[in-house]
Image (cartoon, rainbow, N blue to C red):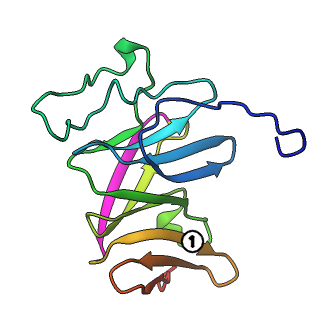
Amino acid sequence: DLNNDKIEIFSLGHRNPQGLLVYKDLVLSTEHGPRGGDEINKIVSGKNYGWPEVSYGKKYYSNKQYSKDHKKKGFEEPLYVFIPSIGISEIIHIPKNFSTNWKNNFLISSLGDESLYRVKFDEKFTRVIFTEKIFVGDRIRDLIYLPDRNLILLALERNGEIGILDPINN
């Protein structure tokens, strides 16, 4: 709270959040996993997401595995896990006026996979219905939607360029 400097821990057990989205009454997070296991998480106040005790990724300098059973250990399961890792970064909601074909979808950018992922969740955000990989060919650090232009901008890393998604056939 910026008015009284009061601090509250909202949730625990996050490894390396890259994207954070407040959408309606929920919070979605994209997080890097170790050697695989990039996650999409639905963040709920007071919950623990398990890092460093559980992960679908592997340990970097060992053949040992993390425990993968989040629920059994009292932690929240991810909504979705990318195996192998995509180098997950930003997540945005795609507004309904961007494209009728992408209504109620989300867009996730990736660094390592040099792609965008169009994602659709079920109505209660308890599971992912589908993901669609859209190859771009550059590391995508960030995404932003420009409502006045109905465009999505991509911050591309390799040469410091900006990519533009324009819904030609809305």
The answer to which image quadrant residue 113 occupies is bottom left
Q: Is residue 49 left or right of residue 132?
A: right
The answer to if 78 sits in the magenta stretch is no
Residue at (41%, 39%) from the top-left corner? 15
Q: What residue is pinned by disc 1?
A: 144
Q: What residue occupies the far left of the structure in this picture?
A: 63
Q: Which residues are magenta?
A: 126-136
Q: What residue occupies the far right of the structure in this picture?
A: 3
The answer to which image quadrant residue 67 occupies is top left
Q: Is residue 63 or residue 145 the one in the foreground?
A: 63
Residue 23 position within the rendered picture, expressed as x and y whole percent measured from the top left: 64, 50
Q: Is residue 66 or residue 83 the one in the foreground?
A: 66
Specify the amino acid type for callout 1.
Ile
Residue at (38%, 17%) from the top-left corner? 71
Q: Is residue 110 left or right of residue 152?
A: left
Up-down relation of residue 92 to residue 61 (above or below): below
The answer to if 129 sits in the magenta stretch is yes
Residue 91 position within the rendered picture, expressed as x and y whole percent measured from the top left: 49, 58
| Classed neighbour count for the residue bearing mark 1: other residues with Cα under 10 Å, few (<14), some (14–19), many (≥20) | some
Up-down relation of residue 52 to residue 83 (above or below): above
**Count of residue discs:** 1
Which quadrant holds the N terminus? top right
Helix, strand, or loop for circle 1? strand
Up-down relation of residue 166 to residue 112 (above or below): below
Residue 160 position within the rendered picture, expressed as x and y whole percent measured from the top left: 42, 85
